């Protein structure tokens, strides 16, 4: 399956998303065509390299291994220092303004590689080969790149669309359960935002998905990618419509930050989605039966659905306000109205939010 992310206003104009069980076999041929003799440099997560490097070499992705650079792609290492490390390695390896980068790894690898590509010699093309579920359904699509500062996540970054994204579920065979769960939270989010058929598929195929059945993974990855693609096409730079993708993220980001990032992103988003569903029910916008479906599906994936007891409602609201100040806007809360439809709500009172947070276990 192949579809384009068309961005008429963007210099890249089009990003090609290629999804399937055999797409890795197409990488070298396609890249050669796309690059017309220019060189690709391969940026790998050093933890993924021992698992999948041999397969890539056997598929002939590169002619010489000195075009391969592995780096420590953990969240704490998602810093400018990683960009400098990669840029210097690229200089040594001979990369110039006619070169291109290919990211092979999860969201950290993709974000750091995309950022480096966007500024290396004033910008070179990049390609993405995402290897986590989260990267396959979310971070590799949409062109956001970036690194963290000690003050917060993704505070430095650019929009730089990858030329092509190769999505192959076979990588997910080696992904730890905990990481699969983080990606599933984003899949469930996509389903709530706009795809009831995807929702029903996830509900009815949970065992196959847990067993990493490739057909089932392919089905959910394709649907999620398509949904994100369509949303980004309508609003590349997040001036409006793209905000629906923030379902569960307002409270989710606050929880992540308050836990000192010991709670994982997808888990925090799951709690955030449950908070949004409760708010929506209290406002009379959604039926309780849909709220129960959301809680049940998240719980069936071992995602948390309650606020950790040591976190107070006041602290969460404060963290949300700080975030809101940072982005200089109103608090836009995305609320589900049913499975497959969300609305943007700007009239949320802090007290109403605190009541729901306490109801869901937050300390006073
Ligand atoms: N650019 C965007 O639009 C966007 C969107 C969402 C998230 N993000 C960013 O993405 C990052 C999170 O992405 P992530 O969850 O992929 O994290 P990650 O890149 O840290 O990967 C998670 C873990 O899985 C390991 N891993 C990767 N592929 C594997 C495989 N096939 N088998 C075994 N282990 C594997 C990694 O080494 C790592 O330990 C965050 O930094 C977040 O800010 C960006
Ligand atoms: Zn997210």
Image: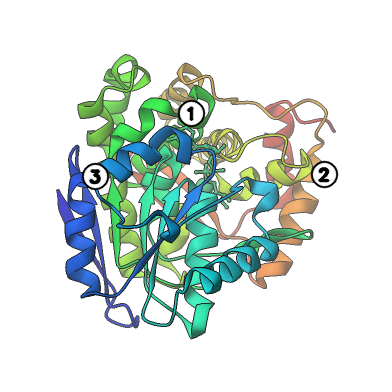
The reply to whether discs 3 and 1 touch (Cβ–Cβ < 8 Å) is no
Q: Which numbered mark, 3 or 2, is in the foreground of this view?
A: 3
Q: Secondary structure at mark 3?
A: loop
Q: Secondary structure at mark 2?
A: helix
Q: Along the polypeptide, which appears first: circle 2 or circle 1?
A: 1
In whole angstroms, how far apart are the C-alphas of marks 3 and 1? 29 Å
Some atom of ligand 1 lies within 8 Å of the CB belonging to the residue at label 1: no
Name the spot of residue 303 as percent of width and height, x first.
55, 25
Which residue matches tag 1?
181
Asked if the beta carbon under badge 3 is closer than 8 A to the nearest atom of ligand 1, the reply is no
**Residue located 19% across and 45% down the image:** 25
Tell me how far mark 3 sits from mark 2, CA to CA.
Answer: 54 Å
CB at mark 2 closer than 8 A to ligand 2? no
Can I make out residue 247 in this image?
no
Q: Report the Cα–Cα distance between label 2 and label 1.
A: 28 Å
Residue drawn at (28%, 51%) of the image: 166
Spot occupied by residue 127 in the image (x, y as percentages of width and height): 35, 62
Mark 2, residue position: 314
């Amino acid at each position: 399956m192949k579809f384009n992310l068309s961005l008429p206003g963007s210099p890249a104009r089009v990003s090609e998303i290629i999804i399937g069980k055999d797409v890795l076999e197409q990488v070298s041929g396609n890249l050669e065509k796309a690059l017309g003799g220019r060189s690709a440099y391969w940026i790998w997560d050093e933890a993924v390299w021992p698992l999948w490097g041999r397969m890539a070499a056997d598929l002939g992705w590169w002619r010489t291994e000195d075009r391969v650079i592995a780096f420590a792609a953990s969240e704490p290492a998602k810093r400018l220092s990683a960009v400098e490390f990669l840029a210097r390695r690229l200089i040594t390896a001979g990369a110039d303004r006619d070169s291109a980068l290919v990211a092979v790894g999860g969201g950290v690898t993709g974000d750091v590689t995309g950022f480096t590509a966007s500024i290396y010699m004033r910008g070179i093309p990049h390609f993405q080969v995402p290897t986590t579920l989260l990267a396959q359904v979310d971070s590799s699509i949409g062109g956001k790149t970036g690194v963290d500062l000690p003050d917060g996540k993704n505070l430095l970054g650019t929009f730089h669309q990858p030329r092509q994204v190769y999505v192959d579920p076979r990588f997910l065979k080696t992904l730890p359960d905990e990481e699969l769960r983080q990606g599933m939270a984003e899949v469930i989010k996509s389903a709530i935002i706009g795809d009831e058929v995807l929702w029903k598929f996830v509900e009815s195929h949970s065992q196959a998905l847990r067993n990493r059945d490739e057909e089932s993974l392919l089905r959910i990855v394709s649907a999620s990618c398509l949904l994100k693609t369509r949303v980004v096409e309508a609003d590349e730079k997040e001036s409006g419509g793209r905000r629906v993708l923030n379902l569960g993220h307002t409270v989710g980001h606050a929880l992540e930050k308050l836990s000192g990032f010991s709670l994982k992103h997808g888990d925090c988003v799951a709690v955030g989605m449950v908070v949004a569903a409760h708010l929506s029910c209290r406002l009379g916008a959604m039926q309780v039966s849909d709220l129960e479906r959301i809680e049940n599906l998240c719980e069936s994936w071992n995602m948390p659905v309650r606020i950790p007891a040591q976190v107070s409602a006041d602290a969460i609201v404060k963290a949300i306000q700080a975030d809101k100040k940072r982005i200089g806007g109103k608090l836009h809360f995305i609320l589900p109205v049913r499975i497959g439809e969300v609305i943007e709500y700007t009239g949320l009172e802090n007290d109403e939010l605190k009541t729901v947070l306490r109801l869901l276990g937050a300390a006073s």
